[in-house]
Image (tube, grey):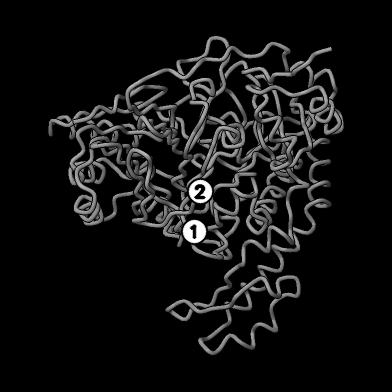
């Protein structure tokens, strides 16, 4: 009898909510309610027009659109079954969305007079869970008391995992395609914070006991065979690679995932880790992470930065997770602290602009993050400056430099920067692409097109680098790595606007005698003292 079961290294562990790839908006019940409505529309469209979806899925231009990928007419019955289950199991969430719609409509009629009488018009299921208030322009809104929604509209019964061996980087786009019983994945009905999920997600390193393995077999979804589960595990313990001694460094794992190792602490920004498989392109994987991650640091809530699939698999290594402060109670800006707690992280620190966290060998400063959110009032976004000895590393993620003066203030406050990491996704999607399901009015096409999820272009990016005095500039978070295709619809080539802007940025930096490059894949960057 096998004494331990170790998950094979090339097996994905994909968290799902109602069989859709999990992201923070599917963890928070009010936003999950609106997204599940959107999912119903996609699934219903597929049932009616499966051939159209198959054709659209082959087009690079509309890869990020609401078209199911990798499924065809033979999968229609399984999709119909998921639609039925969604309506049944998500009924409480659809009721929540209806109640929030009704409350928004009621508040839309408020004319500046007292809102006290309006409390009587709050839908019964929302009573005691909202505060009504005016913004400065007499716009009435409801502040949602977020913790209560996790209690009253628990989504854990909808949570599960899809496991499958990966032999290449191709996976269906996560925002458009659910995992059906016909998808070929091993489906396990285990909530994310369940102790069994904690054991499963750590089983590559720690293994499962026979009792835990049997418990996992008991949580198989209908149609998942026991031998399919067993095939994903091995009784051979992975070779332990002792932590190597090295000087302070920055290790780039791809996209916006950056590990800063100061010598006394390990800080991992926006974790998104690839799986290994035969013939892969060069990359770092879970094996290249330190055994202990002192701080996971999240820059913002977008699904390619707050990546549940990776976070859950490193949960056993992480001491503390650092997240940005949100706009309290704003529907489209849910608390990442609440979300992290719901995922089973116990130690969560929430930071606001210009907060400082003292490290053993330095400091972590939170700096403002402008733009990239379609002009919505979303505050759960921060850049971060790491002080390690006499070195400073600035991570601005997808920040758009909308005003040079902000970085002049940052330079005066913290001093010159040694390494700058800046995203240049400067041709982002319209705001409705990500936030449309949660908007209470449909935007006119011209408005939607004008409010894009843009980062900095070459001119704004170079000015930022110049102002903070960066010695070296690294353009990152461009979703170029092949393992990003399932989570990003971007497929740049050399003629793409963003790539042309990145080259302009590099040329401008080099003309100013500043070392600059576009990161892609994996690289180690020494963090030497001055």
Is 189 left or right of 266, judged from the image as shown? right
Callout 1: helix, strand or loop?
loop
- Give residue 424's quadrant in the image: top left
Percent of width and height locating residue 20: 68, 40
Q: Quadrant of the C terminus?
A: top left
Residue at 50 percent across and 46 percent down: it is 302
**Contact check, label 2 and label 1, Cβ < 8 Å:** yes
Q: Is residue 496 above or below residue 113?
A: above
The residue most toward the front is 360
Q: Earlier in the sequence, mark 2 or mark 1?
A: 2
Q: Is residue 353 above or below residue 392?
A: below
Q: Is residue 528 visible?
A: yes
To which residue does mark 1 refer?
326
Q: Nearer the viewer, residue 309 or 180?
A: 309
Is 224 left or right of 530, judged from the image as shown? right
Percent of width and height locating residue 352: 41, 57
Is 296 left or right of 401, judged from the image as shown? right
Residue at 26 percent across and 43 percent down: it is 461
Callout 2: helix, strand or loop?
loop
To which residue does mark 2 refer?
301
Q: Nearer the viewer, residue 213 or 61?
A: 213
Q: Is residue 54 above or below residue 405?
A: above
- 2 vs 1, front mark: 1
Q: Quadrant of the N terminus?
A: top right
Percent of width and height locating residue 214: 84, 26
Q: Mark 2 and mark 1: span between their CA atoms?
A: 10 Å
Q: Is residue 61 above or below residue 109?
A: above
């Amino acid at each position: 009898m096998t004494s331990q079961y170790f998950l094979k290294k090339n097996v994905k562990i994909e968290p799902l909510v109602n069989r859709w790839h999990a992201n923070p908006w599917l963890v928070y019940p009010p936003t999950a309610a609106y997204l599940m409505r959107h999912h119903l529309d996609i699934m219903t469209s597929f049932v009616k027009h499966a051939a159209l979806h198959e054709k659209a899925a082959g087009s690079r231009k509309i890869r990020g659109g609401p078209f199911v990928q990798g499924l065809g007419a033979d999968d229609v019955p399984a999709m119909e079954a998921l639609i039925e289950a969604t309506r049944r199991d998500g009924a409480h969430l659809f009721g929540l969305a209806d109640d929030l719609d009704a409350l928004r409509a009621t508040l839309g009629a408020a004319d500046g007079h007292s809102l006290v009488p309006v409390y009587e018009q709050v839908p019964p299921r929302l009573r005691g869970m909202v505060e009504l208030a005016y913004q400065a322009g007499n716009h009435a809104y409801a502040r949602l008391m977020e913790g209560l929604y996790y209690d009253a509209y628990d989504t854990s019964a909808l949570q599960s995992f899809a496991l499958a061996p990966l032999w290449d980087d191709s996976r269906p786009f996560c925002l458009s395609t659910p995992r059906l019983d016909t998808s070929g994945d091993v489906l396990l009905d285990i909530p994310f914070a369940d102790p069994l999920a904690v054991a499963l997600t750590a089983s590559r390193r720690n293994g499962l006991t026979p009792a835990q393995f049997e418990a996992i077999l008991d949580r198989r979804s209908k149609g998942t065979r026991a031998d399919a589960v067993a095939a994903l595990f091995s009784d051979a313990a992975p070779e332990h690679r002792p932590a190597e001694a090295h000087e302070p460094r920055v290790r780039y794992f791809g996209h916006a995932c950056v590990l800063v190792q100061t010598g006394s602490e390990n800080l991992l920004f926006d974790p998104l880790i690839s799986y290994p498989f035969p013939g892969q392109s060069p990359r770092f994987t879970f094996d290249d992470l330190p055994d202990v991650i002192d701080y996971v640091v999240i820059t913002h809530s977008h699904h390619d930065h707050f990546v549940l699939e990776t976070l859950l698999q490193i949960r056993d290594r992480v001491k503390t997770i650092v997240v940005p402060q949100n706009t309290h109670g704003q529907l489209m800006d849910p608390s990442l602290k609440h979300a992290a707690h719901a995922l089973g992280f116990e130690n969560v620190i929430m930071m606001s602009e210009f907060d400082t966290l003292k490290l053993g060998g330095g400091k972590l400063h939170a700096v403002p993050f402008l733009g990239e959110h379609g002009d919505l009032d979303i505050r759960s976004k921060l850049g971060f400056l790491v002080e390690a000895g006499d070195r400073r590393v600035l991570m601005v993620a997808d920040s758009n430099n909308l005003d040079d003066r902000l970085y002049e203030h940052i330079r005066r406050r913290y001093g010159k920067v040694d390494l700058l990491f800046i995203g240049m996704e400067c041709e982002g999607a319209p705001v409705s692409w990500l936030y449309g399901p949660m908007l209470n009015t449909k935007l006119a096409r011209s408005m939607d097109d004008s409010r894009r999820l843009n980062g900095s272009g070459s001119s704004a990016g170079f000015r930022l680098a110049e102002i903070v005095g960066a010695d070296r500039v690294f353009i990152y978070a461009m979703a170029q790595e092949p393992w990003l295709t399932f989570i990003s619809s971007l497929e740049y080539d050399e003629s793409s606007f963003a790539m042309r802007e990145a080259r302009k940025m590099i040329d401008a930096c080099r003309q100013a005698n500043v070392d600059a490059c576009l990161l892609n894949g994996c690289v180690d960057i020494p963090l030497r003292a001055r």
